[in-house]
Amino acid sequence: MLKVTIKNAEGQEILSKEGEQEIAFLCERTYEEGDRIVVESSEKNLPKSGAECQQSVM
């Protein structure tokens, strides 16, 4: 399980999504200083090495 949460500078949750295979969402909000992206994962189905991971950043 993978969970991605966007929090503002005060720690309030702006958006949170979770899924088993992938997560897709759109946040129509402008970044403000102190905003955070929090990524949490369970150990289930994690790749054995970093070579098995793909990362894309927009």
Image (cartoon, rainbow, N blue to C red):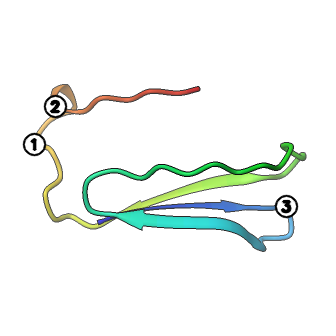
Q: Position of residue 49 (x, y in %)?
A: 14, 35
* Marks 3 and 2 in Cβ contact (< 8 Å): no
CA–CA distance in space, label 3 to label 1: 34 Å
**Residues packed near mark 1 inside 10 Å, few (<14), some (14 to 19) or many (20 plus):** few
CA–CA distance in space, label 2 to label 1: 7 Å
Q: Quadrant of the N terminus?
A: bottom left
Element class at badge 3: loop
Residue at (56% x, 51% y) in the render: 25
Residue at (13% x, 57% y) in the render: 45
Q: Determine whether, in the image, residue 44 is placed left or right of residue 35.
A: left
Which dot marks residue 9? 3
Residue at (78% x, 49% y) in the render: 28
The three-letter amino acid code for the residue at tag 2 is Glu
Say which label, 3 or 1, has the lower sequence index: 3
**Residues packed near mark 2 inside 10 Å, few (<14), some (14 to 19) or many (20 plus):** few
Element class at badge 2: helix
* Marks 2 and 1 in Cβ contact (< 8 Å): yes
Q: Is residue 43 above or below residue 12?
A: above
The three-letter amino acid code for the residue at tag 1 is Lys
> Quadrant of the rendered structure where residue 30 is?
top right
Residue underneath mark 2: 52
Say which label, 3 or 2, has the lower sequence index: 3
Q: Position of residue 7 (x, y in %)?
A: 72, 63
Q: Position of residue 54 (x, y in %)?
A: 30, 29
* Marks 3 and 1 in Cβ contact (< 8 Å): no
The three-letter amino acid code for the residue at tag 3 is Ala
Which dot marks residue 48? 1
**Residues packed near mark 3 inside 10 Å, few (<14), some (14 to 19) or many (20 plus):** few
Q: Is residue 28 above or below residue 44?
A: above
